[in-house]
Amino acid sequence: MTDSIVAKIEANPKYHELRRKRNGFGWALTALMMVVYYGYIALIAFNKPFMAQPLGAGVTTLGIPMGMGVIIFTIVVTGIYVRRANNEYDRLTAEILKDAAP
């Protein structure tokens, strides 16, 4: 890209809106993911008896489905971000590029 196009993009209020929305949402999802992941690790480290509770009469403990829950949560959070990126962020990006076109 030429410097004039870059300058047009950086001066566009939609570009600043896109950055603000994307960064805010990304940090919020990151914080949520860290709480879930490190919460799970903290339970393993500091409350082993809770995580070792058997489920039913088998050998599966509470930690196994909770670990699967962390994995599923990660997939869901990724899906939420991708959906928002494909709908909102891509629309804003297209508008920004359209406005910056010579």
Image: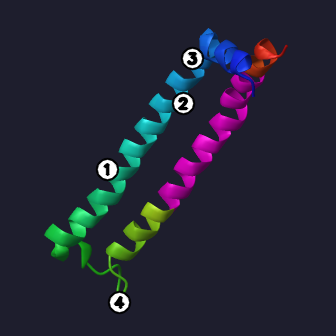
Give me the residue at 29% from left, 58% from top: 38
x, y percent for residue 6? 67, 21
Callout 4: helix, strand or loop? Answer: loop
The kind of residue tagged 1 is Val
| Labelled pair 1, 4 in contact (Cβ < 8 Å) | no
Q: Which residue is mark 1?
A: 35
Relative height, residue 51 to residue 26 (above, below): below
Residue occupying image coordinates x 39% and y 76%? 64
The secondary structure that dominates the magenta segment is helix
Q: Quadrant of residue 57?
A: bottom left
Whether the magenta-drawn stretch holds residue 88 is answered as yes
Residue that numbered label 2 is attached to: 22
Answer left or right for 93 relative to 80.
Answer: right
Q: Judging from the image, what secondary structure is the residue with disc 3 in?
A: helix
Residue at mark 4: 59
Q: CA distance from mark 1 to mark 2?
A: 20 Å
Q: Earlier in the sequence, mark 2 or mark 3?
A: 3
Of the two numbered discs 2 and 4 in the rendering, the one whose residue sits closer to the viewer: 2
